[in-house]
Image: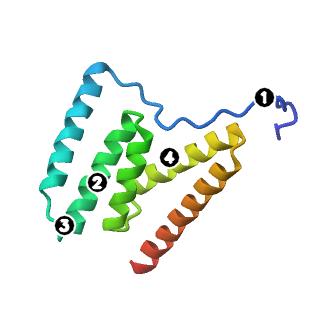
Amino acid sequence: MFGLFKDKNKKKEVPKVSEEILTEEQKEQLKKKIEDLNQELKLTAENNPEQLAFICEKLGLAYAKLNQENEAISVLEKSLSYKLTIGDGYKKLMSLYNAKRAEAAKKGDDSGIDYYMNKMDDMRQIAKKVTISR
C-alpha cells in the first residue's frame, strides 16, 4: 500500500519496444510486407504526400515489429514529414524515442538523453499542431 514495502534497490527495466514474440513464419510475412511496401513507395508519385505518409507509416510499423528500431524511426519520421498525424505511426515513434532515451539513460549518455528528449518534445509539438488544426 502506498509503496512502503517496495524494494528501493530494485533496478528499473528499460522499456521494450516490442513485447510481441513472432514466429519465423510471421517474421517472413513481415519481411515480404516490407519488400512490397518499399516497392510501392518507389512507385508512388512525390505529389501524393498522403499516400506516401500512409505507406511510410505501414513500413515503419512493420520494421518496429521486427525490432529494427533505427529503420522504423527513419521511416516513421519520413511519414510525418509528408503528413502530420497522431495515429499509430506517431504513437510507435514516440515509444521508440522513449525506449532510446531510456537506453541512453541506462548507459549514462547525457547527449543521447538530450537528443531523444528533444525528439519527444518535437512530437508533442506535432500533437499540438494536429489537435489545433482539427
What's the CA distance linking mark 3 and mark 2? 13 Å
**Residue 53 drawn above or below residue 112:** below
What's the CA distance linking mark 2 and mark 4? 16 Å
Residue drawn at x 86%, y 30% is 5
Q: Residues within 10 Å of mark 1 (few under 14, many from 20)?
A: few
Residue drawn at x 75%, y 30% is 11
Tell me the mark number nearer the camera, choosing from 4 and 3: 3
Q: Are marks 3 and 2 in contact (CB under 8 Å)?
A: no
Q: Are marks 2 and 4 in contact (CB under 8 Å)?
A: no
Tell me the mark number nearer the camera, choosing from 3 and 2: 3
Tell me the mark number nearer the camera, choosing from 2 and 1: 2
The residue tagged with tag 2: helix, strand or loop?
helix
The percent position of residue 30, horizontal first and vertical second, equals 26, 33
Residue drawn at x 19%, y 67% is 46
**Residue 128 drawn above or below residue 67:** below
Q: The residue under label 3 is which amino acid type? A: Glu
Q: Residues within 10 Å of mark 2 (few under 14, many from 20)?
A: many
Q: Which mark is residue 96?
A: 4
Q: Residues within 10 Å of mark 3 (few under 14, many from 20)?
A: few
Task: Specify the quadrant of the image occupied by residue 83.
Answer: bottom left
Left or right of 102 in this view: 37: left
- For marks 1 and 3, the one nearer the N-term is 1
Q: Which mark is residue 46?
A: 3
Residue drawn at x 40%, y 57% is 77
Q: The residue under label 1 is which amino acid type? A: Lys
What's the CA distance linking mark 2 and mark 1? 39 Å
Q: Residue furthest top?
A: 24
From the image, tell me which residue sits under label 2: 56
The residue tagged with tag 1: helix, strand or loop?
loop
From the image, tell me which residue sits under label 1: 10
Q: Residue furthest left?
A: 43
